[in-house]
Image (cartoon, rainbow, N blue to C red):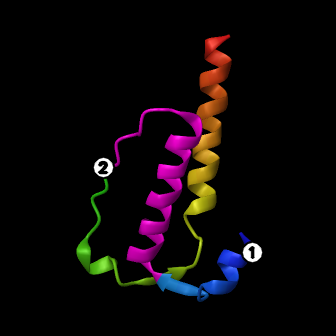
Amino acid sequence: MRALLKDHDTYVPLREELSFTDDYLDIEVVRFWRRQAARGEEIDPRTLEVLVPSILLQPLIETASSTGLSRAFTAAR
């Protein structure tokens, strides 16, 4: 993760941040052998070039993903 942060600028276009998030979700699908969740993104194309802090969304997606997994494991018991 540190190497990734060193290689990125402090701010990136939202389009790039969303692409990174999609890549992260793809890894999670392979890692946990689960069906890929629907991604119903409705994003105004005019916002895709707005600069946002790098790695802004990944921690939120990671937390949501791990919370969902722990609930699924608890329900299966």
**Image quadrant where residue 11 sits:** bottom right
Tag 2 secondary structure? loop
Q: Residue at x 43, y 33 (%)?
A: 35
First to last magenta residue range: 13-40
Left or right: where 7 falls relative to 40: right
- Residue in front for this viewpoint, 45 or 19: 19
* Image position, residue 33 (x, y; %): 52, 33
| Marker disc for residue 59 | none
Give the image location of residue 51, x and y in percent. Answer: 46, 85
Q: Identify the residue under disc 2.
A: 40
Q: Is residue 73 above or below residue 4?
A: above
Q: Residues within 10 Å of mark 2 (few under 14, many from 20)?
A: few
* Residue lying at 52% horizontally and 42% vertically, measured from the top left: 30
Residue lying furthest top: 77
Amino acid carrying label 2: it is Gly
Instruction: Looking at the image, tell me whether mark 2 or mark 1 is earlier in sequence order.
Output: 1
Q: Is residue 14 magenta?
A: yes
In this view, the mark in front (2 or 1): 1
What secondary structure is the magenta-colored segment mainly? helix
- According to the picture, the residue beneath numbered tag 1 turns out to be 2
Residue 38, percent from left and from top: 34, 42
Specify whether 23 is left or right of 66: left
Under circle 1, the secondary element is helix
Q: Quadrant of the N terminus?
A: bottom right
Is residue 32 covered in magenta? yes
Quadrant in which the C terminus appears: top right
Under mark 1, the amino acid is Arg
Task: Give the number of marks.
Answer: 2
Q: Residue at x 48, y 59 (%)?
A: 23
| Residue 28 drawn above or below residue 53 | above
Residue appearing at x 65%, y 22% in the figure: 73
